[in-house]
Image (spheres, rainbow, N blue to C red):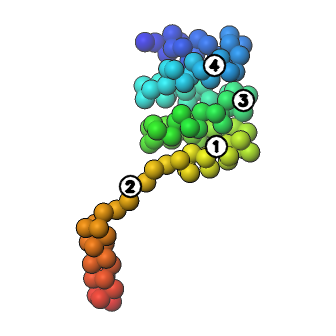
Amino acid sequence: MAEDESPLIKALPPESDYITYLTIVEYNLNPENLPILHKVLQDETLAINIGWDLVHLLVPFLPESEQCLQDIARLGNPREVILKVTESLRLIEYESPDDESLDELSQTLAGALDSR
């Protein structure tokens, strides 16, 4: 699909309102559309109005979505962006290391200390 045929380009405000556009982004967001979204987010007004609401949608696409998240951090509404980033970080489920990997880590650290 050509870039100008992308729903992310065709539906840009004023073609649609910000809430509708956000919904269109949500339904069409995939790794192939991230460069288009990055280009679209250069519009400061758009980034301010919807950027903070894109954070939770972009986190699952990391590291590919890093440019878009940086655009939002740079151009978006700071207060809302900080709140959404904090919320997204809180929701990340980290894998807890198993006992075997903890033992290996302990031995590695102990070996490093012994060699001093």
Which mark's residue is nearer the viewer, 1 or 4?
1
- Mark 4: amino acid: Tyr
Between the C-alphas of marks 4 and 3, the distance is 10 Å
Q: Where is residue 7 in the image (x, y as percent from the top left)?
A: 54, 14
At x 68%, y 13%, the residue is 16
Q: Which of marks 1 and 3 is in front?
A: 1
Q: Which of marks 1 and 3 is nearer the N terminus?
A: 3
Q: Quick check: 95 above or below 104? A: above
| Residue type at numbered disc 1 | Lys
Report which residue position mark 2 lands on: 95
Identify the secondary structure beneath mark 3. Answer: helix
Under circle 4, the secondary element is helix
Q: Earlier in the sequence, mark 4 or mark 3?
A: 4
Q: Nearer the viewer, residue 76 or 92?
A: 92
**Which tag is nearer the camera, tag 2 or tag 3?**
2
Q: Mark 4 points at which residue?
A: 21
Q: Mark 3 points at which residue?
A: 49
Residue drawn at x 49%, y 28% is 35
Q: From the viewer's perspective, is the residue at label 2 or at label 1 nearer?
A: 2
Q: Which amino acid does label 3 sit on?
A: Asn
Q: Residue at x 73, y 39 (%)?
A: 77
